[in-house]
Image (cartoon, rainbow, N blue to C red):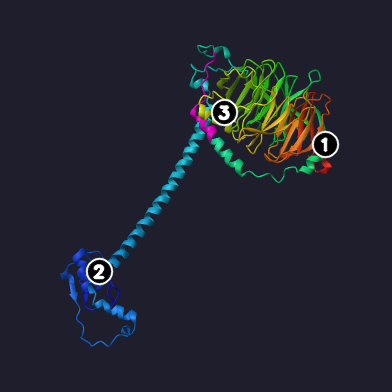
Amino acid sequence: MNCSISGEVPEEPVISKSSGLLFEKRLIERHISDYGKCPITGEPLTMDDIVPIKSGKIVKPRPVQAASIPGMLGMFQIVCASEWDGLMLSNFALEQQLHTARQELSHALYQHDAACRVIARLKKERDEARALLAQAERQIPMSVAAPDAVNAATLSNGKRALEDEEMGPDGKRIRPGISSSIISELTDCNAVLSQQRKKRQIPATLAPIDAVERYTQLTVNPLHRTNKPGILSLDILYSKDIIATAGADSNAVIFDRPSGQVVSTLSGHSKKVTSVKFAAEGDLVVTGSADKTVRLWRGSEGGSFECKHILKDHTAELANSFSYVFISLLSDGVLDVQAVTIHATNNYFVTASLDNTWCFYDLASGLCLTQVEDTSGMNEGYTSAAFHPDGLILERILISIGNVQANVARFDGHIGAVTAISFSENGYFLATAAQDGVKLWDLRRLKNFRTFTPYDETTPTQSVEFDHSGSYLALGGSDIRVYQVANVKSEWNCIKTFPDLSGTGKATSVKFGPDAKYIAVGSMDRNLRIFGLPEEDGGPSES
């Protein structure tokens, strides 16, 4: 039998009365003198509890170990008995400590894993609670929460009771402001969309370059009146493939492209409609007009739209550009409402006007949360407006300035008014159009890296638009041109030029369809033109 401490056959074996374990006498005596307990069971142990075991005296033969150096080293233990005993006891104590440390580490890792799971669950519950709170704040009329400060009563026909709004000492209406919960919502939206944008791949269904080169006019759709012709803006709802157009005849038209039928005509503005945009997955349509008003239209099951809110916060015409706020500079002309742009959350939108102000609205209630005026004296009004694809630029204004009182960057270089702006979905490029052509800007360095001058100096570029994948850029003026998007250093090649078949020489709005399968063009006649591949070549089907 072997010693329970050293694991070797004992010279002087003793046994414990309480545990029955066998030990080497000198080892167990030293352990008891140091710790006073059994090294195996941990129970109290004294010298009286140790019973020696008698064994016969036998003359031991010469061990085999004595014939080798390792064996002889083992025999030297007898000479260095005290040191060997200390080594055995120390080694045994270290093994016990290692076993205890492993158990404690295993328990700590289990506790850490459980804590991480609890934290993840609490974060999820917190985010859900924030989302529900933000949704409740949008659904509950703010006029009920703060009737004395806001007083934004709404009449039964959708018109706001402006005369009841409280005025400040400077003669301006008091706005409730942008709350911290709204800022948090915009911040969260930006974080999500930024991550999605980094992982986004060009879809396999995107129209290839050779297909775009073969595009031709497919349909001509007369949507507006002949006495006041002109399509000033258009938007496409990709999920349903329907197109909204804003006309100089003071109407906006909802057009179903696959069937070729007019779904609804939005009548109510008293002057030309300068901008139109789908919101909330097509359930809402927002229009801006030269009559200084913005109208919110809600769709019904039958496909018709009813005006729910008439917003009269501007004193001038709205800009003629909607998009995903970067505020464009410069303006020449009369005071009008010039643009409306929808935030990526589909809960808020911004209007920009030639009155040198822009307003931030809640989409559900139509309430103006804040109105910001440019007091620098450098602008003559806003002519275009657009949100960055993930709301980054507006979000930075909100976070860094709180009440949204200034622009984060100014892009100088155009001659005359900026007529259109468009962000690429890659988040890096911005295209601006004006009298002197189109300029491309690198948002990472805030520098102009390329300029297109497709027309002479008397012909302005009226429209510019990236497709949803960021692979193509279209611009419109006296004709329509499509460029292949490249990087900052590479050349952007013009792959297709469409003549202006309207005869007016003014292509005012250009928009790519889903996956760039077609291009919708509005001009200063009353027709919406669709360019794409003929059906026999794999183009979009038409009724």
Residue 86: give its label. 2
Amino acid at circle 2: Gly
Quarter the C terminus occupies: top right
Q: Is residue 18 left or right of residue 439?
A: left
**171 or 141, which is in the foreground?**
171
Please report whichever mark, 1 or 3, sits nearer to the chain's N-terminal start: 1
- Residue 179 magenta-drawn? yes
**248 or 68, which is in the foreground?**
68
Residue at 31% x, 84% y: name it.
66
Pointer 1 local density, CA inside 10 Å: few below 14, some 14–19, many at least 20: some
User: Dot 2: what SS?
Assistant: helix
Residue at 60% x, 41% y: name it.
196
Measuring from the top left, give residue 55's x and y in whole percent: 21, 83
Find disc 1 in the rendering and name its residue: 216
Amino acid at circle 3: Val
Q: Is residue 460 visible?
A: yes
User: Dot 1: what SS?
Assistant: strand
Measuring from the top left, give residue 396's x and y in whole percent: 54, 31
Marks 1/2 in contact by CB < 8 Å: the verdict is no
Residue 408: give its label. 3
| Image quarter of residue 77 | bottom left
Q: Is residue 180 above or below residue 104?
A: above
Q: CA distance from mark 1 to mark 2?
A: 96 Å
Amino acid at circle 1: Thr
Q: Which residues are magenta?
A: 172-187
| Image quarter of residue 372 | top right
Q: Is residue 73 left or right of residue 275?
A: left
**40 or 5, which is in the foreground?**
5
Quarter the N terminus occupies: bottom left
Please report whichever mark, 1 or 2, sits nearer to the chain's N-terminal start: 2
Q: CA distance from mark 1 to mark 3?
A: 41 Å
